[in-house]
Image: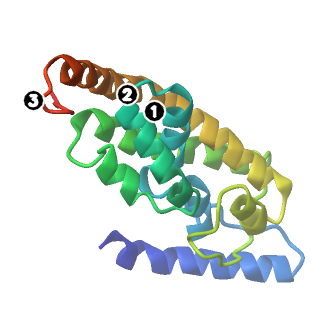
Amino acid sequence: MVNGIIRPLWMENQTDNIAAIQAGTTPPHIITEQFFDMIWMGGAGATLSLVLAMLFFARSKNMREVARLGAGASVFNINEPILFGLPVIMNPIMLIPFNLVPLVLVTIQYTAMKLGAVAVTTGVFIPWTLPPVISGFIVTGHISGSVMQLINLLIGAMLYLPFMRIVDKQYRAAERAAVTQPDAPLAKQE
């Protein structure tokens, strides 16, 4: 629903940026669809950051397995394996960073572009499945776009980490209980 309202505005900004590049001037608009494509790495909620946090810091078998299985799809911005496998959906603990991380990343990236530390998007249209780092370079035409995405991934992972650890601890407790009580449910959300 929101896309139907906001996408025409983004497309107008992209068109203006393309015209500015063709005229040899600086693109006037920071907020474009590509700006958000640089944020939504791994899909909505910037969940590639969550996948990285899970791959490096998860201790429960369940969470490591979900991260391993969902990592390939997440690189191409497909996050349903993570959203429903972890789960993020209907999980009040994970919904907090799922909504918080993109807000923080938008603020940081907007500020970096406004200050000139990162090149503004040029208006180039890319498929939404283009992996991070490559997409950052293509939409900005500069290595600073790729560097910004790497920084966003690290910040996102740090923001997801405390929440991921809470869920990971619940999974570990359930896994230990399953060893001592084979009929116990594997993942009990409290």
State which tag comes first along the sequence, 3 or 2.
Answer: 2
Mark 3 lies on residue? 183
Q: Is residue 160 left or right of residue 91?
A: right
Label 2 environment density (alpha carbons within 10 Å; few <14, some 14–19, many ≥20): some
- Residues marked 3 and 2 touching at CB (< 8 Å): no
- Residues marked 1 and 2 touching at CB (< 8 Å): yes
Give the image quarter of residue 171.
top left
Q: Cα distance, mark 3 to mark 1? A: 31 Å
Q: Residue furthest left?
A: 183
Q: Percent position (x, y) of residue 123?
A: 69, 75
Please report the residue visible at 27 percent of the width from the left and 25 percent of the height from the top. Answer: 175
Q: Percent position (x, y) of residue 118?
A: 77, 50
Report if residue 104 is visible in the image: no
Label 3 environment density (alpha carbons within 10 Å; few <14, some 14–19, many ≥20): few
Q: Amino acid at mark 1?
A: Tyr
Mark 2 lies on residue? 163
Viewer-proximal residue, 59 or 39?
Answer: 59
State which tag comes first along the sequence, 3 or 1.
Answer: 1
**Numbered label attached to residue 160:** 1
Report if residue 167 is visible in the image: yes
Q: Cα distance, mark 3 to mark 2? A: 27 Å
Please report the residue visible at 79 percent of the width from the left and 49 percent of the height from the top. Answer: 116
Q: Residue furthest right?
A: 24
Q: Percent position (x, y) of residue 190?
A: 14, 26
Please report the residue visible at 51 percent of the width from the left and 60 percent of the height from the top. Answer: 73
Viewer-proximal residue, 154 or 24?
Answer: 154
**Numbered label attached to residue 49:** none
